[in-house]
Amino acid sequence: MSNVQDKPALMRRPIPAPAVSVETKPFWDAAREGRFLIKRCSDCKKAFWYPRAMCPFCMSAETAWEESPGEGVIYTYSVMHRSPSGPYAIGYVTLDEGPAVLTNFVDVAPGGLSIGMKVKVKFQPTEGGPPAPVFAPA
Amino acid sequence: MSIKGKAYVMGAYEHPTRDAPDKTTAQLHTEAAKGALADAGLSFDDVDAYFCAGDAPGFGAMSMVDYMGMRKVRHMDTTETGGSSYLVHLNHACQAIAEGKVNVALITLAGRPRNGGNRPGARMAGGAPPGLSDGPPEAGFENIYGGSTHNTYGMCAMRHMYEYGTTSEQLAWIKVAASHHAQWNEHAFLKDVVTVEQVVNSRMIADPLHLLDCCVVTDGGGALIVTSPEVARSLKRPKVRVLGAGEAPKGPRGGLDLDLTHSGAVWSGPIAFGEAGVTPADIKYASIYDSFTITVLMQLEDLGFCKKGEGGRFVADGNLISGVGKLPFNTDGGGLCNNHPTNRGGITKVIEAVRQLRGEAHPKVQVKNCDLAIAHGTGGSLGTRHASATVIMEREG
């Protein structure tokens, strides 16, 4: 009994509905199916984040969506203690494909995070919008 | 100096669309930019000055510079005068080029009022498709995660500690120094001198930043008057001459350039020092933006007051306290103790530097023979995208 009570709660934070634009609608449509998409330039071949229509590296308009396993490592994080819904963690994941992604870390206790930790994407329902990508320990 | 004959319009492009249901405003700005650059025979990597007005989505020019992936922008202007903005921008671009600071200025306009584009202009009947937004391009992927200044700067501090071994005690010294100065400022919001122990034992706000690592939240304001040399000579006040200035945005740029231990000061600083013809070792007083303790530490490193990664050792043991250390900083108490009016600390940084150069700072914190000062600031967030600005000033006579 006391062991259960002593165990710190796993972090989880309510996420508001994301702003969906005509440029990013395919990402959020895929998110509803549990698929994590990133954008890659068809010309310079670099993957980038956040998704946008044109490549931020070579300005090619030829960019394509590709499904990613959503695996990577924590680049940095910060646990916010001033929160009505309890502590939550914001941070960046460096995806195996290269780009860094801003996100929340979930299913982990506030003291359980570390830079370099392997994490994997999962989708969390939002308040009236499509599910949003969050990351949990792999 | 006049702009007459000093600048050329070498690219111009009118977007062919008159109805853009399938594109965002950010995309239209970028397509227009690409068209004008192609017309001139230049690329995004040639652009070192960017101008936009209120039709550009995001926070000033920062969202669009990052969206377009521009790496070399060192001058930004978001003057807003409605439909004439772009003519004002052209004039300002000519001024920036005439003074020799930049070579290629990009000015963009775009919007989609027929499709409910959310600024500026009236929403047409029918509006946007249900549920679709046309705001800052990064919004859907960033604004939903509960980012605040506290935890986005916390991410920077966490990474800095990881890469360089910086400690909370070292960061605390920055607050301690500010508090030593604030005790002499009758207007300071926090006047009590604090210790390293008090800072590191204060309530954790956003790892690893404690309550006392944060700046104050205050109402108020400030203003500056800048004059020509002729007007300056006619006035009965000590003359503070501007020697150099630099500015630079920095962002994640497609997620491949994310580097939260460096700020745009690595670019804005050398421009300002170069123009002024001085080095960090020459500076007698430093106003350094202090939204958080980590903000000061990173910027001191990036400006060259110490090597990258050595900021923790540099700020420790009172090195920033006037009369005690080698680099007196924020002698008004700074944003950490004195004032951070409307959550924007840039102007108070200039104001205290002017007081120091005039010899009008509080006698307990006045730097002796203070003839050269720096004022440096960061706006936006070091944890996402921000703009750095550096100004170097000297006392004349």
Image: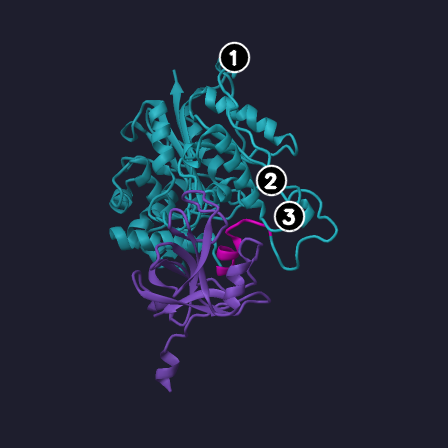
Chain colours: A purple, B cyan
Which quadrant is the N terminus of chain A positioned in? Answer: bottom left
> Which chain letter goes with mark 3?
B
Q: Which mark is residue B117?
A: 3
The residue closer to the viewer here, B45 or B371, is B45
Residue B128 position within the rendered picture, expressed as x and y whole percent measured from the top left? 66, 53
Q: Is B50 covered by the magenta stretch?
A: no
Give the residue at mark 2.
Answer: B110
Residue flagged by tag 1: what amino acid is it?
Answer: Ser
Per the rendering, the mark at residue B291 is none
Q: Residue furthest right?
A: B125
Q: Answer yes or no: is residue B365 visible.
A: no
Which mark is in front, 2 or 1? Answer: 2
Which residue does the image show at 29% across and 50% down from the upper left?
A: B170
Q: Based on the displayed image, in which of its 4 quarters is residue B375 positioned?
A: top left
Magenta highlight range: B134-145
Name which residue type carries label 2.
Answer: Ala
Q: Looking at this view, name the residue that lies furthest to the bottom.
A: A1
Q: Would you name the residue on which mark 1 appears?
A: B234
